[in-house]
Image (cartoon, rainbow, N blue to C red):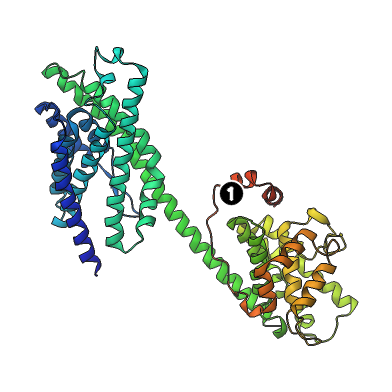
Amino acid sequence: MTIDRAVRIYVSGVAIAAVAVLVVTRALPAVSVDAWGIGIFLLVGCLLELSRTTSKSGGVTGSLVFVFHLAVGLVLGAFWGAVTAAIAKLISQLYERNDGLKLAFNVSERAVSVGLTFIVYYFLRGQHPPPFLLPNVGTQITLGAAALQIGAFLGAALTYFSINSALVSTVVALATGRPVFKTWRSNTVWVLGYDLSASLIALGVVWFYVRTTGGPVSRLAFLALCVPIIGARHVYNKLSTLKDLFAELDSAYEQLELNVREQLQMMVKAIEARDPYTSGHSRRVCGLSRAIATDLGLTPEQVEEIENAALLHDVGKIHAEFAPLLQKEGKLTEEEWAVMKTHSTKSAELVSLFSRFQGYVVSCVRHHHERWDGRGYPDGVAGEAIPLGARIITIADTIDAMTTNRPYRGALPLEVVLSELNRGKNTQFDETLVDLTINSVTVRRLISDPTLIPEYIPSPKIRDRMTEARERANPKLQKFGAFRRAANDQA
């Protein structure tokens, strides 16, 4: 089925639903109709329809016209609320000269949303208008009765936003070929709380309306209410603009991340081209580190930082002095080994040139050859003073070294690798991490068959703003987060 046909079928279904909703609302108990009320709500509704805002991300429009939809429904009931909303939408669509399909959907959607909203309001025992808003009556209403009416209104408002957002997001998704839920989340979640809060303005509109219906002059005073409502509409517009700006920044950030990773991939391949026996080493260490960090229960953001450090842990070997050492088939002399030991600091220096990686990633790269007992290099730090990411990379680096064919020996089997890891507990390695690695089904499978380790560059992720909250809630992540923040402060 083509996209165009799917949209037409969907719009036809919404139009049929609109007729059905109007029939049902007409059958509800009659509410006193006031021609002036319908006219004034229709006028203000048209003004707000014509001043709606547009979201660049999904093409969905929005405004504060829903305040008047809710208000007219509270005053005149489900049927006239739906009719008024539909007519206001029709007028705005004709003014904008939209095509027939778009006009039919927008008008039908508005009738369905408002009509179903006040059907729900009726079954929640809501009254038109709520008695606590009436002059000379509101003071006689008990707090409990007023609370029930407010609850019925909020339930109806939630129904409005749910139905409206579902109908609009679905048609946008069908027209663009995007997933429905992703489209709904992109255009609704960010502003849902604001919409629910703004819906309470409808109660204020009704309160003011019932006090300005005594004569021509007082009725005209109701139009004065449009001024603050239009002002609030500008706040809504600013929120929409800000949201679109964040989306553009996120997109630019992701593209920058991809560009950086492509450059890093070229650097890593250039280094490994010097030593055919370690080809793919950094990317395999990256994959093993990811498996261990994931099994440890770290967040995606923390896993990403460790992936980056693992990928870059040997990048310092691109310096010319390491070329003959990497190509040498025999064992290194003491002088050569002293030079080789400087690769971790040189790697950290290179990685620190990328502002994105300064702090925790640089620390993990610098300390990936430290030992739990403090006999490692370059700084001889020990225990938990070694960054968690560096401790993970140390184990992954050792596993890859043992499972790779070398000139002086072949790849070691799983049993030998696990035995060597056990022997290094509390001396070379963090005992907790060794136990987790040995008991990990994923890591065991990767050790048995290193070809299963994905050789990839980690995909960019936008940092989750809830990371700090998750660290506070999970004691296992607190030390990781504290070290990362300390490293960032020192950078």
Residue identifier under label 1: 467
Q: Is residue 478 visible?
A: yes
Residue drawn at 23 percent across, 37 percent down: 119
Quick one: 171 or 438, which is closer to the camera?
Answer: 438
Q: Amino acid at mark 1?
A: Thr
Q: Residue 318 placed where, x, y %?
A: 70, 75
Q: Residue 111 placed where, x, y %?
A: 19, 44
Quarter placement of the N terminus: bottom left
Q: Quadrant of residue 81?
A: top left
Figure disc tally: 1
Q: Is residue 353 visible?
A: no
Q: Is residue 391 left or right of residue 62?
A: right
Q: Residue 401 placed where, x, y %?
A: 75, 76
Quick one: 395 or 275, which is closer to the camera?
Answer: 395
Quick one: 152 or 201, which is closer to the camera?
Answer: 152
Please identify the residue farthest to the right as the structure is shown: 334
Identify whether 12 is placed above or below 31.
below
Q: Residue 414 placed where, x, y %?
A: 74, 77
Residue drawn at 32 percent across, 33 percent down: 199
Identify whether 273 is placed above or below 55.
below
Q: Is residue 258 left or right of residue 334?
A: left
Q: Is residue 274 left or right of residue 238?
A: right
Element at label 1:
helix
Identify whether 259 is placed above or below 325.
above
Quick one: 402 or 374, which is closer to the camera?
Answer: 402
